[in-house]
Amino acid sequence: MSNSIEEIKKEVEAFVVSSEAELEAYRMRFISRKSIIGELFGNMKSVPAEERKAYGQDVNALKNLAEERFQFHIDSLKSGSKKAEDHPDLTLPPIESQFGTIHPLTATRQRFIEIFERIGFNVSSGPEIEDDWHNFTALNFPENHPAREMQDTFFLEKNPDIALRTHTSSVQIRVMENEKPPIRTLSPGRVFRNEAISARAHCVFHQMEGLYIDKGVSFADLKQTLYHFAKEMYTKDTQVRFRPSYFPFTEPSAEIDISCQICHGEGCNICKYSGWVEIGGAGMVDPNVLENCGIDSSVYSGFAFGMGIERITMLRYGIKDLRLFTENDIRFLKQFNSL
Ligand SMILES: [Zn+2]
């Protein structure tokens, strides 16, 4: 018997633990109830009475040794793993960093701002939740205008009306109320309209509006500014044309078309074989709007324009479906790595 105790003692001392699995193997062999040391305790009864005391002492000493060694293995395993953390293996190949890409809408907005900053425009922002005055009334929308209907606008409250802004013209009103001319400002931002989502329309999209108010501003200034914009945003040979239109807040008003960037006037399905694509609306700020904001319309005049950032971006990169901008499909976004 004592021989076997001696052998187990040697085994305990020689046992190597360098992993959690080996630690568990050690525990099963020497510490647990069913371990070989546990068995030795079980054998106690079969030991002759006169040897029992000495046997008990030997087994106890072995048990204490096994437990000491167990604690030692636990401690050295812990400090070993800490060492590995402190000293990572520098020869391992690096984990490649995944960089995000600039969203194409952000790139277009930045380009917009760059173009207009150079001709003296600053950037303004305003709330996305607007009251009736800033979104409609100050902009000369008549009482019965369809945009004021529930099917076109997301109202949050009625009487007094609070709605998600339908354009960033509301920002222009806030600027005119708070600043004295000359005013040259861009108002980029998210706008909301109650529209079915399709390849060409979305209920949430982005606008870029521009406003210039000073003494003696004419329609010629508006045209020249937008010619400059089109050539800078697209190519030097881009043509611009103005078609008469109507908006409550400008008079006269025009739709802005540019020559098709896809077919260069030859005709394609993007321009519906006309050679022209619409990019936004513009006009001379209606004197009523100036007066609503406390600006003397007999002294000052100005122009305003508005464009959809999505539309400008689609023409810029030949993107055919507006929904791609908000689907977060990495295969789409990765194509703009170089931005
Ligand atoms: Zn075309």
Image (cartoon, rainbow, N blue to C red):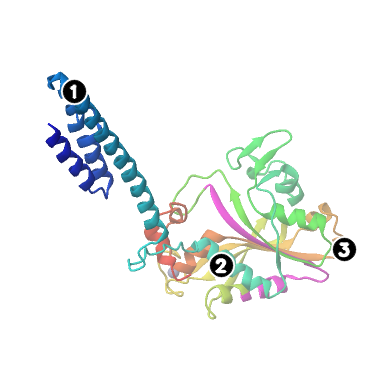
Residue at screen point 76% across, 65% down: 302
| Disc 2 residue: CB within 8 Å of ligand 1 | no
Q: Amino acid at mark 1?
A: Arg
Say whether disc 1 or disc 3 marks the residue closer to the N-terminus: 1
Vertical side of 336 occupied by 2: above or below: above
Does the magenta segment cover residue 121?
Answer: no
Task: Give amino acid for label 2.
Answer: Asp
- Which region shows up in magenta? 203-228
On the question of residue 248 being in view, the answer is no
Percent across and percent down for residue 151 are: 57, 39
Q: Quadrant of residue 144?
A: top right
**View quadrant of ligand 1:** bottom left
Q: Which numbered disc, 2 or 1, marks the residue that appears first in the sequence?
A: 1
Q: Nearer the viewer, mark 2 or mark 1?
A: 1
What is the C-alpha distance between the residues marked 1 and 3? Answer: 119 Å
User: Alpha-carbon distance for marks 2 and 3?
Assistant: 31 Å
Q: Amino acid at mark 3?
A: Ser
- Mark earlier in primary sequence (2, 3): 2
Give the residue number, with chain letter if any, for mark 1. Answer: 52
Provide the residue designation for mark 2.
Answer: 257
How dense is the environment of label 1, judged by Cα within 10 Å: few (below 14), some, or many (20 and up)? some
Residue, disc 3? 298
- The nearer-to-camera label among 1 and 3 is 1
Residue 209 lies, in percent from the top left, at 65, 61
Q: Position of residue 212 (x, y in %)?
A: 74, 66
Q: Residue furthest bottom?
A: 236
Q: Residue furthest front?
A: 50
Q: Residues within 10 Å of mark 3 (few under 14, many from 20)?
A: few
Helix, strand or loop for disc 2: strand
Category of crowding for the residue at label 2, using alpha-carbon neighbours closer than 10 angstroms: few (below 14), some (14–19), many (at least 20): some
Q: Quadrant of residue 84?
A: bottom left
